[in-house]
Image (cartoon, rainbow, N blue to C red):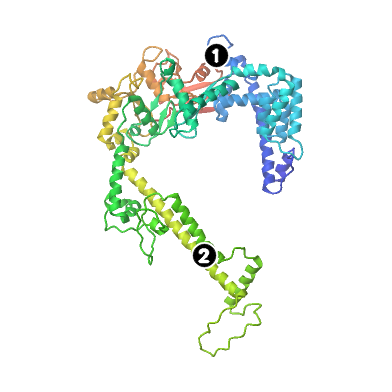
Amino acid sequence: MDDVLTAAVCAPPVGWARGPLGLVQACDREVSRQSALRYRAVAAFALSRPSSVDRPQGTRGAMAAERWAARPELLRSVSEWATQELSIALSLTSTAAENLLTSSLTLVHRLPATLDALESGAVHGGHVAAMVDHVAPVADDTVRAALERDLLAWAARRGTVCTPAQLRDKARREVLKRKARSAAEDLARAITRRGLSCRPDQCDGMSVVSALLTTPEAAALMAALGAYADALPDDGRTRGQKMADALMDLVLRPGGHGLSPVQVVLNVVAPVGALLGGDQPCEIDGQVVPAEVVRALLAALTGVRITTAEDTAEDMTAEGDAALAEAPATADTAVEDPAVGDSAVGDPAVEDTAVEDTAGEPEDTAPDVPTDATAETLADGWDEPIPAEVLERWAAEEDARTADHLLAGRDDPIPERVLIRWAAAEDARVAGQPPPHRRRDTAPDSRPTGSPPAQQPVPDGWWSRADRAVDHAGAALLVAEQAVGRARRLVATAERADAADETAWAASPAGRVTAAADALGALATATGDARADLADLLDRTAGGGLADRPRVAVTDALTGALLALTDLPGLRRATRAGTGLHAPSETDRYRPGAALDRHVRARDRRCRFPGCRRPVPKRGELDHATSWPLGATAAANLTGFCTEHHRGKHQAPGWRHDLQPDGTLTVTTPSGLTASTEPPPY
């Protein structure tokens, strides 16, 4: 720890803590020091990639004018391909890599004192972000340097704590004092960054849409949506849910304004098992969603609810409940011993071996409704959820019983000195010695030898109190052991109930569909109605709720690689002809045909550049690995890119892209880094 403390130049404003917390402080300063070295190295790398190698603005293939205008000024002298190389080296997205480049150049060229403070440990990354956001944009070098000096001194005051939020607030106030005239110019530049963004939520199937607006626009939008929500009747939705629904209605279904509904195209990828009721994950525009989301979406678009395996599973569950009602004591055996199978349920000859041995205890049965039943009764077969008020009453009764045993009428804590005397008395009694400090007025026992002890009242002295304390402690221990036993039985019952649910679901059509190894296995285990509804969906053409005919992806059962993309008529033709399915054949022109274009986009789905997750645009951006006409327009020679990385493939100097026939793409950077990507499996 001394070595680490020596490396940290700047001590914390509140001093060094003793013990492990001091090591935490030292480590935090070491992290700051390494971060400063990282910023300097990134800035040096940026200087080694000048923008002179890029195509000048206005020439064919150069960066779009809109994107060039939105690019930070500090990056104008840096090649746009430096971002891609940095993203590969650090496993960052393009946006994160560009932000790191901008921050590094900002600290080196505009906030050198902040970078020095970071390296010495006087500030950490949160402080640096506040300085970059609020001080770095100041155009006047003199004003910016003075602001930086004053704010760093304020943050490092001895005996104080300065959080990043405090520094941000202080920086806002100081900046407005010294550059109020340029506030309007800053706002005008910020208005150009207005826009929308979307990112997936932590919960699969949900996404967060963010809108960057001016403060008045944002306030007006929230007020309008709030007014719409307040005008809706109380139907169980929260105000926030109503506002979200109102926003969707206004944007997608503006019928009140005489405008036609907006039509959008969503690319839905759903395994056959998911459509038949299984739990396989699906995709909507490249985002992973639960299968139920896709089933609900298709039902809303087509107006027809696919008969999934869940419907049949509900019927089976009802039948199973009836069987359990006839013989509840055998349900646990069917769960604990899978070899018994379904025949064990309802068989009175099967013995319940999963319940703990309770020999000597009366056998309880589950009551119709939860009353004052004990935990053992619940453990022996109660299947319904326990009402909260019953659980609270049980807890209160148990607390009261425990309190009675422990306190024995006392409502004040037992002094520690009394507990010590009781412990000494008990040790003496066990050793067969007279208890210490026996009362002198206690006469010795003068009864004849062999006569029964006289029943005389025991004085309420320390000896009797010690005996009672020992009895109370033993009773309390017994109560605790009984409570632990009941808790264990409750846990065992819950585990058996959960296992019973899992076993019942696995035996249902939905469970069998989910466990199927491939689409053919899922179809074989599905119900007839579900297969008929699925065929009806696949047979639908354009129009109605679907913008295009549903396609069937034929994939490798082991790797998930796309083998062919077809539809239901194509499956029927291939079956009749016996020719099998394969990727579309190559074309004799530069642009691929409709079938080949659809196949490559379905195979890649996202940009194939390492680390990029942008979707392949709906038109264009399919790249020939070997330039046409030297290379064929075929699936083995085509790769899907986003616009930025497609341009980089042709323009970035020193880069190499190698495509294998199976679709594996290997990218080599000018620095010698190598990264490979494969088409995402289904």
Q: Residue furthest left?
A: 576
Of residue 81 and residue 503, the one placed in the foreground of this image is 503
For mark 2, what is the residue? 477
Of residue 172 and residue 462, the one placed in the foreground of this image is 462
What secondary structure is marked by label 2?
Answer: helix
Q: Relative to 182, does residue 112 appear above or below in the rendering?
A: below
Of residue 444 and residue 47, the one placed in the foreground of this image is 444
Q: Is residue 199 visible?
A: yes
Q: Find out whether the residues at labels 1 and 2 contact each other: C-beta distance under 8 Å.
A: no
Tell me where residue 94 sits by quadrant: top right
396 horizontally vs 42: left or right: left
In percent of width and height, residue 32 lies at 67, 35
For mark 1, what is the residue? 64
In percent of width and height, residue 218 lies at 56, 23
Tell me where residue 141 sits by quadrant: top right
In percent of width and height, residue 259 lies at 42, 15
Q: Is residue 86 visible?
A: no
Q: Amino acid at mark 2?
A: Leu
294 horizontally vs 23: left or right: left
Q: CA distance from mark 1 to mark 2?
A: 78 Å
In percent of width and height, residue 37 lies at 67, 31
Disc 1: CA contacts within 10 A as few (<14), some (14-19) or many (>=20): few
196 horizontally vs 159: left or right: left
Q: Relative to 512, does residue 398 appear above or below in the rendering?
A: below
Q: Amino acid at mark 1?
A: Ala
Mark 1 or mark 2: which comes first in sequence? Answer: 1
